Image (cartoon, grey):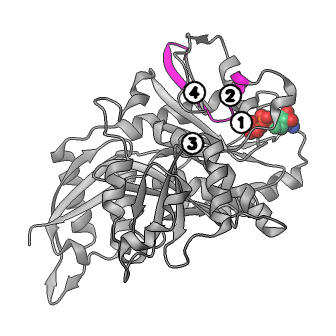
Amino acid sequence: MTRSRDALVADFPGLTRDRKYGEGNYEGQRFIVIDTGGLTGDEVGLDAEMARQSMQAVEEADIVLFLVDGRAGLTAGDEMIADHLRRSGKQAHLVVNKTDGQDPDVAAADFYSLGFDSTYLIAASHNRGIRSMLEELLPNPEEGEEDSAERYPGIRIGVVGRPNVGKSTLVNRMLGEDRVVVYDMPGTTRDSVYIPYERQGTQYTLIDTAGVRRRKNVRETVEKFSIIKTLQAIDDAHVVILVIDAREGLVDQDLHLIGFVLDAGRSLVIAVNKWDGMDPEERSRVKEQVRRRLDFLDYADKHYISALHGSGVGVMYESVEACYESAMAKWPTNRLTAILQDAVVQHQPPMVHGRRIKLRYAHQGGSNPPVIVVHGNQTEALPGAYKRYLENTFRKILKVNGSPIRFEFRSSE
Ligand code: GDP
């Protein structure tokens, strides 16, 4: 469904054990697939943990595919799971796999007693039946639905991070900074809360994945962390503030989240939170760790803040503005072409099969993230190092701050 062996974008050990998230695209319809460890229907011990994870995935999902093994036939476990799914009230479909090499109808016959309204017969490893299944499952894109985030005014800031890093404290602090005008909230999308507000004459919408405003009481502070929610917030944002807990330092899950942001092409501000009350030694240790592990992100601003006390929060808006300007910038073709040609004069691309790779002109192909389309010959042979050189050159001259730049190369032969 994700058309890739390793489209599984992340594996969150501990946090979402046995749940993996991948992004798919069927004819322009984008979707997220959650792959789970599996259920036996009769769970004890390790299986019970796996079942809990699977049921959490069910809870997060809009559509549930109950995959059964067409070779193994119906088991008692299948019946228990089917029963459970029915009670969950989710839109669930039966998918019979491994129907290759046998009469699909015979393979499926066993399972009809489970009582699902719709059944799909597939052979996943042969890529059979997948497209027609997606065709039927995915809702037809409605006019304007694609950019529902556009309804929210101004600069959309997604605040994301692991549980307890201080997201909700930061959201409250950002709203409390100076005098903000919070508009009536026109409802919520999914579980994140979209909060439009104005600060010093500029409009913003905070996308709050921690769901602060919904918490009815303090006891509710342990939020269910949802990767789907995080992925959607990132997608809807112009600028993402990734919150890290300085007391714990940079952990693998933070890096996964950064990976999501970069994959989505969003611009990024790093907020290292809980900086208050840390002794100088600890501070320099954390700074060193951030410098070392995030050296590939040298174009993103890092702020050391205390969401609790507010220090460092106000100046983050400067980074947010810079990110937004970079993400949405428009550059004329002649400017991009001039930069490209200068870069090529400075450093010739290599020869391939006795002919030099030619890069002729460049134009902009999109915003948020900015896309630069480069036209030439044999561009498919362009080495990674040369692409990085181009990116660095464009980044420096165009002053692209905080945002990734995407390059597309087109060959005319
Ligand atoms: P979330 O789950 O990411 O939304 O995290 P919360 O905002 O609920 O914060 C988790 C805990 O960290 C709470 O007890 C906060 O009071 C605390 N916290 C948040 N920001 C700071 C900070 O800047 N300094 C300190 N010392 N504690 C903080």
C-alpha gap between disc 1 and disc 4: 11 Å
**Label of residue 90 in the image:** 3
Q: Is 145 included in the stretch rendered in magenta?
A: no
Circle 1/circle 4 CB separation < 8 Å? no
Find disc 4 in the rendering and name its residue: 206
Q: Amino acid at mark 2?
A: Val
Find disc 1 in the rendering and name its residue: 167
- Badge 1: how crowded within 10 Å, few (<14), some, or many (20+)? many
Q: Amino acid at mark 3?
A: Lys
C-alpha gap between disc 3 and disc 4: 30 Å
Mark 1: is the Cβ under 8 angstroms from ligand 1?
yes
Mark closer to the chain start, 3 or 2: 3
Determine which quarter of the picture holds residue 185: top right
Circle 3/circle 2 CB separation < 8 Å? no
Mark closer to the chain start, 1 or 4: 1
Left of 373 or right of it: where is 86?
right
Q: Is residue 75 above or below residue 89?
A: below
C-alpha gap between disc 1 and disc 2: 6 Å
Mark closer to the chain start, 3 or 1: 3
Left of 93 or right of it: where is 390?
left
Highlighted range, magenta: 197-214
The x and y percentages for residue 73 are: 54, 74
Q: Quadrant of the N terminus?
A: bottom left
Mark 2: is the Cβ under 8 angstroms from ligand 1?
yes
Which residue is at the front of the view, 326 or 224?
224
